[in-house]
Amino acid sequence: MTATPAVFDPGAAATRATDAILHDTLHGTARGVVVDSPPGAGKSTLVVRAALELAEAGRPLMVVAQTNAQVDDLVLRLAEKNPDLPVGRLHSSDTDPYDKALDSLDHVRKSAKAADLAGLPVVISTAAKWAHVKGVEPWQHAIVDEAYQMRSDALLAVAGLFERALFVGDPGQLDPFSIVGAEQWAGLSYDPSGSAVTTLLAHNPDLPQHRLPVSWRLPASAAPLVSDAFYPYTPFRSGTDHGDRALTFAVPSDASAPDRVIDEAAESGWGLLQLPARHTPRTDPEAVRAVALVVRRLLDRGGASTSERSPDPTPLTADRVAVGTAHRDQAAAVRSALAELGVTDVVVDTANRLQGREYDVTVVLHPLSGRPDATAFHLETGRLCVLASRHRHACIVVCREGVTDLLDDYPSTEPVQLGTLVKFPDGWEANHAVLAHLSEHRVAWRP
Amino acid sequence: MSLIATLARLEAVSTGRAQPAATVRHRHLSTRPLVFVPLITAGEAGAPLGALVGTDRDAPRLLAVPQPRDRDQRFAFLAELADVVLPYVDGFADTVEPAERSETDPETGKRVKVEVELCADAPQLIVPSRAGIDLVRLLGRSTRFRRTAEQDPEAPFPAPPRVPLLGRWLTHFGERARVPGSSLLLAMTDVLSRHWATGQSTLEDQHLGALLAWIAPPEGLSGAEAAQRAELARDAAGQLLCPPAGPATDPAFDNKLLAPAIERYDRARTALAAAEDGLEADDRLGALTAAEREIRALVESRTRPTWDAVWQGLDLLRELPEGARVEERWTRDRWSFTGHRDRVTSGEPPQPRRDDAVTAANKLATREREQSRLEAQEALDDPLVMAARRLSGEAFAGEVVDVVMAYSESKRPSPRPLVTVRTDDTPHLGERARAYRSLGGKPQTTEFVGYEDGPEGGLLVLRVLDKMGRGKEPEPGSVPEKGDRVCFTLFEHEPRGGAKLPDPEETPWTHGGPPGEEPAPEPADQVTEEDIL
């Protein structure tokens, strides 16, 4: 055994992991390969690279992603890496089924019929669209992206289309859900409401499993917290070190609470703007306004970020900031509060829709803020994990006081189902871990 | 809970009466439902103690099990239950109407229409509470694999002839009850709390007596007082005035009344078995019959108030007019009933113990589709439900203030009129979002073009996209006119069907491959020592 290097070299560790994955994918004998990827660990890069290598090896490849945005993004990335590779984009027959940017790519063929795309080295579509493809020769290989967010029944519908597959996903993000109860099948290995990977591994326990060990997105200030709170048994590291990234503001603080929390977050990577304890409706007007104010000040203060990507400071523009909420009506309320303050081009969305996205600074309305109860929805580990892991520089959480008491009043009481894998950590524990850390970066505010 | 539901609950608290949560009835009610009020024995899963069952509110059939741990008596109970349930179910099997169904032709692989039978009506089972539905499922599970002496002469404890069939029907009812919006098997508390908002928690709403106390409190009492009395009031002997709707019984009843009665029954039975001559046996038989009659009276005393409460609930629900789309959902229930009738008559084995991967996925897909359909249909049927959706930004109502004719840019221009709607609602309309309105029961699609004077102005411009006929001019009545009151939803009215899943024989490797050949029919559980008294 060779001596472990004294200094952790993130680049080398990531390369070793990627090489092993590509080796198993291209030369392995197993029908499937599973890759767990923490937030920002280069999952998309891996998918693009694997797709290009499989295409180069002459193996017809289908790629399954979960949303149209993910599919379009993959097509664009593939075209960027290899503009001459013919790629098929299978799309629905709705109006505007794909991103118009695809029209400018010469080697991307788009069709609503799989037969039109036959013979292309790579065909990409959503799981929902693939499920309608029938009566075709199976593809030799498939890549299933965001496999942990794919439901088992969606995999059932498409698995007949390929012989072997590479499954890539982030186990810490939101689990797939169903809008009706599915307790009836809990504990069955093929529970249709479970995640595709759970079913796959239950039936094929010997498949090789890999893990990407380095998050390139999360800064050194965030990776340890996210890793400890959400991935306690599969830790990962940040690809950058303290001091590699910095966030500075041209306009000094006006000593208001939003400015102070911005400075705290710029300094430490985390900020908690704490409002007084109170039970509120979901669209808590004070909290929503606080979120909007923080965003307004972030943009007004002439922020600039420096990072390992470029030595020159990059201005912190509206497209580098995002707001995350738990519910859609909260997102809508934040959007209108932002519009009142004259901010229109900042992305405001729910955790579900922010999955897989990356920003410099995120402002998060805490899922439990102002709630009288802690339901399974609000406690879900993945929700908090998504919201707390979208940023490259800093994350500012807006929350009412009293969430720790709320957590203690409502320990998770979900019934334990026989035969299901207990997921660690549970939301209760993860929420406590995150809150404990955030409380060190607290700015109290009474609006 | 929606904002409007919270408001209704607050109003219920302040007025002391349940508030309407719906203006129409959202579930089908049969003209002749079969009401089933079961009781079970404490500490013995699935051991029935008795039941009231029947279709005549004045003459329920009383079933009682004097010694619930005696398997013979349990079978006798189930056989008696089958005597009530199966003739009722069969009564709907023979009246059929012709209908069409699309099927895949096995030879050509094309979808073709086939003439089939559809039962003109279907049975409806009503239990007091959700726990009753669980018991129906449990009874179904525990009886559908039993073997009768005719099926298997070797069976050590053969079931009475019709019991396995009863189990198959109860299983079907129990499975169908999981489909949102279905009405084959209803729990009275669920249906009542769908239509009224009380001033108590949803957990407390599962107490039928308390729920009815809020909806129709007795003279001189507020809903809260009446509900508290229903939950807690006891007579001088310490027994609840309003016994729980079951199937579980009150521990005070179990300990003070039921246990001594069963003990007396057991003693009488032992004494009868030990009788040495005919005369003595006659005497002791009399004592046994008396002990049995006592238990029957106890069971009746605990089920009759619930029985009456269920019928009272039915009366209350019948006062509401049926929602316009309830009939359509009931037709789905009729299809489900007809399908199971056909499976039974064609001699198929009972429902398997566990769903295979494909069946489970298909069921989940159906239920998700029915859930979206139910949510959309309830809103379209009921302005009060629509109000909740409008408040949450998923719909908007308003007045048409302008209609400008426009056409699509294609070789054969089609009408694409622009409709301006003034609304006080605040829908979450994104760029090019779709909005739908109901036009003669069918959804008409429009596209959100923009606000006429900013989001605050409340003037929305929509482009109508379909349902205007094939001509250059839209068909009369297909485009809203100035001054019309309109209501648009951002959710679709008809959920789309999902993709077809592979056949179970083609289950892919990711899901364990095709299910193995199971010995059919599945054997019942092994008999253990505990099974025999």
Image (cartoon, coloured by chain):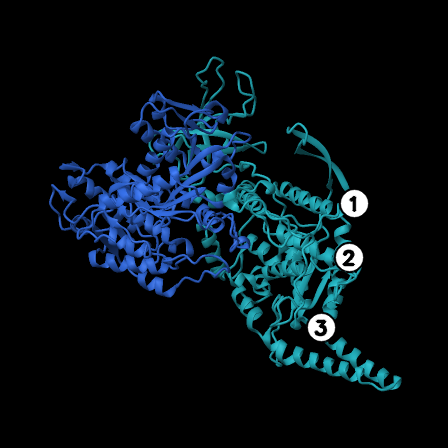
Going from N to C along the chain, the mark reached first, 2 or 1, is 1
In this rendering, does residue B59 appear at all? no
Distance in Å between CA atoms under marks 2 and 3: 23 Å
**Three-letter amino acid code at disc 1?**
Asp
Q: Are marks 2 and 1 in contact (CB under 8 Å)?
A: no
Q: Which chain is blue?
A: A
Residue A42 in view in this figure:
yes
Give the residue at mark 2: B151
Q: Is residue B434 left or right of residue B342?
A: left
Q: Which chain carries label 1?
A: B
Mark seen at residue B94: 1
**Residue B451 in which image quadrant:** top left
Q: Neighbour class for label 2 at 10 Å: few (<14), some, many (≥20)?
A: few
Chain B: give its colour.
Answer: cyan
Choose the circle earlier in sequence order: 2 or 3. Answer: 3
Residue under numbered circle 3? B70
Count neighbours of disc 1 (C-alpha within 10 A) and say few if under 14, some if 14 to 19, many if 20 or more. some
**Mark 2 belongs to which subunit?**
B
Amino acid at pointer 2: Gln
